[in-house]
Amino acid sequence: MLQVKDWQHVFKLDPNKPLDEASLMKLCDSGTDALMIGGTDGVTFEKVFDLWDRVQHYDITCVLELSNLEAIMPGFDGYLIPTVLNSKDKQFVVGLHHEAVKEYGDLIQWDDVLVEGYCVMNEQAKVYQETNCQLPAVKDVVAYAKIAEHMFHLPIFYLEYSGTWGDPKLVEEVSRELDKTLLFYGGGIESEEQARTMKQYADVIVVGNIIYEDIQAALRTVKACK
Ligand code: 1GP
């Protein structure tokens, strides 16, 4: 059964970006709680398989965050399924999910699957544009968090600033709304200090881009969560 409640920190690896073996080894040995494999574009079955295969040499939890039907593959320790709460397009809220379950429903190990209620906050991010989002005001974000916790009982609410640094005050406000639902924060974390700032409020911080820009800086973000 996929357990995320003890996670503090995860690295998100983009199958569409090259990562040398030495860097992958450092990430796996860093003390992070898991590797999350996921991205917005260019995510193909071959690229996901290649990364999964390389990670098998290391002792680390590795989960797949699904962004399209093409990249679904068995073998991961768990599967995170985003539902984009501030998307204007039903496709990204429940549509792709419906297609996937129609096709693969009998094969899914439901204990390994967790749904993430995404709230995407960066208008410039690919994920914002691809999933046709609407920028929520603070009160909207708080309402989405309440929906995630009290109406849909989602295990995860993911405040996604992908590519840019978010607003710690908003993360704090959202954290006050959530009790059972875990708060994931991702976006623009490039230093230990930034990781520590968001970790005060978020249960789990997600570190992505900096892996590909400065591996040492990426590794230092783990320290802030331990
Ligand atoms: C992206 O939330 C993650 O989906 C992490 O964001 O790439 O900006 O670190 P960054």
Image (cartoon, rainbow, N blue to C red):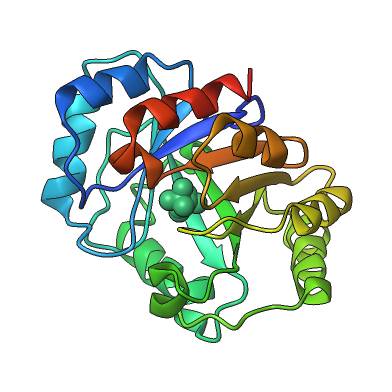
Spot the residue most to the right: 176
Q: Nearer the viewer, residue 123 or 146?
A: 123
Q: Is residue 104 left or right of residue 136?
A: left
Q: Position of residue 191 (x, y in %)?
A: 53, 35
Residue positioned 44% across, 69% down in the render:
125
Residue positioned 47% across, 37% down in the render:
112
Q: Is residue 132 above or below residue 219?
A: below
Residue positioned 43% across, 25% down in the render:
219
Q: Does residue 33 appear anywhere in the picture?
A: no
Residue positioned 62% across, 48% down in the render:
185
Q: Residue 67 is drawn in which quadrant?
A: bottom left
Q: Is residue 72 above or below residue 199?
A: below
Q: Is residue 115 left or right of residue 20?
A: right
Q: Is residue 8 left or right of residue 152?
A: left
Q: Position of residue 26 (x, y in %)?
A: 31, 18
Q: Position of residue 6 (x, y in %)?
A: 65, 24
